[in-house]
Image (spheres, rainbow, N blue to C red):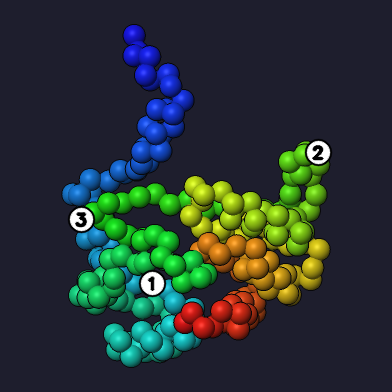
Amino acid sequence: MLSPIHHHPAVSRKIMSEVQPAINVLSREQIDSLHHYSLEILSRVGIRVDSKRARHLFANAVNVPENDKVVHIPAEMIDWALAAAPSAIDIHDRLGNFSFQLGNTESPQTRFGIGATNLYYQDPKTDAVAPFARKHMELATRLGSALSNFDVISTIGIIQDISPQVADLYGTLEMTANATKPLVLLISEKQCFDAALDLLEHLHGDLI
């Protein structure tokens, strides 16, 4: 039989707030084995690289013909890259304030974000479903900003009441204008990627 204290709402909320979800899929031995075979595949079988720019970088790094689409990456180069990359990255909000750290192995914590790329919007008051529009990006972004248990805001939907050639830019603008939380941008149109980064730099280049 449970003690009466367990039924107190304040105690229940405190217990739930201290719960930290975690997923353990592979053992250390399995991870090492997977890494070993990955190195073997990358070095012996190789990978297909369609990007000319990427092939140029590989040609300079591993001394392979630049016109060869199959690139074999030496295991020692991969190990060097893994060792050189930071094991943890600090994430800040739009105001420059520290939000959280990704990759902290000492005290790992699952992070949650609102999103992503919905095609329709369901009105919470009427249950009516409509194609995702610019105004829905504004509303959903503000909701994600107000919910404290969401750490980031991803691109919530694909705006359909604006031309696809510029919809990504308007979506980025709405997310930036209606939240200060870290953003995870999902760009549908290839030509909009650099333009979206230019837009963010224009709006908040002083943080760089």
What secondary structure is marked by label 3? Answer: helix
Give the numbered dot on residue 126: 2
Which of the 4 quarters of the picture holds residue 194?
A: bottom right
Residue 58 lies left or right of residue 138; in this view the side is: left
Task: Identify residue for label 3.
Answer: 32
How far apart are labels 1 and 3 at the CA level? 21 Å
Q: Residue 100, percent across and down?
A: 39, 60
Which of the 4 quarters of the picture holds residue 172?
A: bottom right
The residue closer to the viewer here, 120 or 59, is 120
Type of amino acid under label 3: Asp
Would you place residue 101 above or below residue 172 in this image?
A: above
Q: Nearer the viewer, mark 1 or mark 3?
A: 3
Q: Residue 40, percent across and down?
A: 25, 65
Q: Residue 34, percent across and down?
A: 26, 55
Sequence-first tag of 3 and 2? 3
Q: Residue 99, percent across and down?
A: 42, 61
| Discs 2, 1 touching: Cβ within 8 Å | no
Would you place residue 86 above or below residue 146 in this image?
A: below
How far apart are labels 3 and 2 at the CA level? 52 Å
Sequence-first tag of 2 and 1? 1
The residue closer to the viewer here, 35 or 6, is 6
How far apart are labels 2 and 1 at the CA level? 50 Å
Label 2 CA crowd tier, 10 Å (few <14, some 14–19, many 20+): few
Task: Identify residue for label 1.
Answer: 47
Type of amino acid under label 2: Thr
